[in-house]
Image (tube, rainbow, N blue to C red):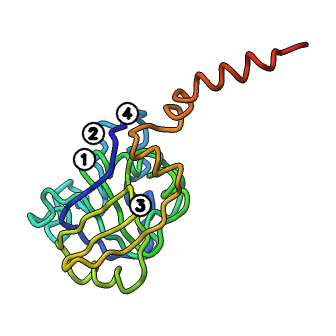
Amino acid sequence: MQAITRIQSRTIVLPTRDIDTDQILPARFLTTTSREGLGAYLFNDLRFDANGQARPDFVLNQAAADGCAVLVGGNNFGCGSSREHAPWALLDYGIRAVISTEIADIFRNNSLKNGLIPIIVDASTHEFLLTNPGVEVEIDVVNSTLTLPGGTVVEFPIDGFARYCLVEGIDQLGYLQQQMDDIQTFEEQRPWTP
């Protein structure tokens, strides 16, 4: 995982509430254990019609979405079943952070473990972002802040351990591997006896 300290990007707005993980990545695309290529299926049933043609009214199919790395979602984003494939698809597509007033716990945890930043904001900040698509925002992972146009700074909650892993560019296994000397010393001081 790559270290993440700061994200600066325009926003994409998908205001629909209760976007679940099956809408983010439909179950029929869960047959792979690889993260690569899943971005092509992101929001598949919302982005494309039954014939596979892009729906021009869907936000990701519009030119304004090109290059945007921050998605502003409606309330209760990421609800539904647990699947790491959902954050994988967002990341593979190029989304680095999701902002909402509510982000489902399992989705939030899966996101943090994979390098996608889930940001929960207050209702007025959320309303500003929903009604101003395409604004430039800056996310400071180290200080857990979101800077809006005009310089307004909004703090967001993030688990300390998850933040450490994101900033260091490691996952949970990488964290344990960093502790290997201490683990070995602990084991040597407490020999196993049957």
Residue 116's spot in the image, x, y percent?
A: 38, 52
- Label number found at residue 171: none
Q: CA distance from mark 4 to mark 1?
A: 13 Å
Which amino acid type corresponds to the residue marked 3 in the rendered image?
Pro
Q: Are marks 4 and 1 in contact (CB under 8 Å)?
A: no
Q: Amino acid at mark 1?
A: Ala
Circle 2 is placed at which residue position?
Answer: 37
- Work out how far the residue at label 4 is from the one at label 3, CA to CA, in angstroms: 22 Å
Q: Are marks 2 and 4 in contact (CB under 8 Å)?
A: yes
Q: Residues within 10 Å of mark 4 (few under 14, many from 20)?
A: few
Which corner quadrant of the image does residue 146 belong to?
A: bottom left
Mark 3 lies on residue = 118
Q: CA distance from mark 1 to mark 2?
A: 6 Å
The location of residue 154, given as percent across then percent down, is 36, 75
Q: Nearer the viewer, residue 73 or 151?
A: 151
The secondary structure type at the circle numbered 1 is: helix
From what the image shows, is residue 42 above or below residue 19? above
Q: Going 29% across and 64% down the picture, which residue do you hit?
A: 71
Residue 117 found in image quarter: bottom left
| Pointers 1 and 2 in contact (C-beta within 8 Å) | yes
Quadrant holding the N terminus: top left
Label whose residue precedes the other's in the sequence (4 or 3): 4
Q: Mark 1 — residue?
A: 40
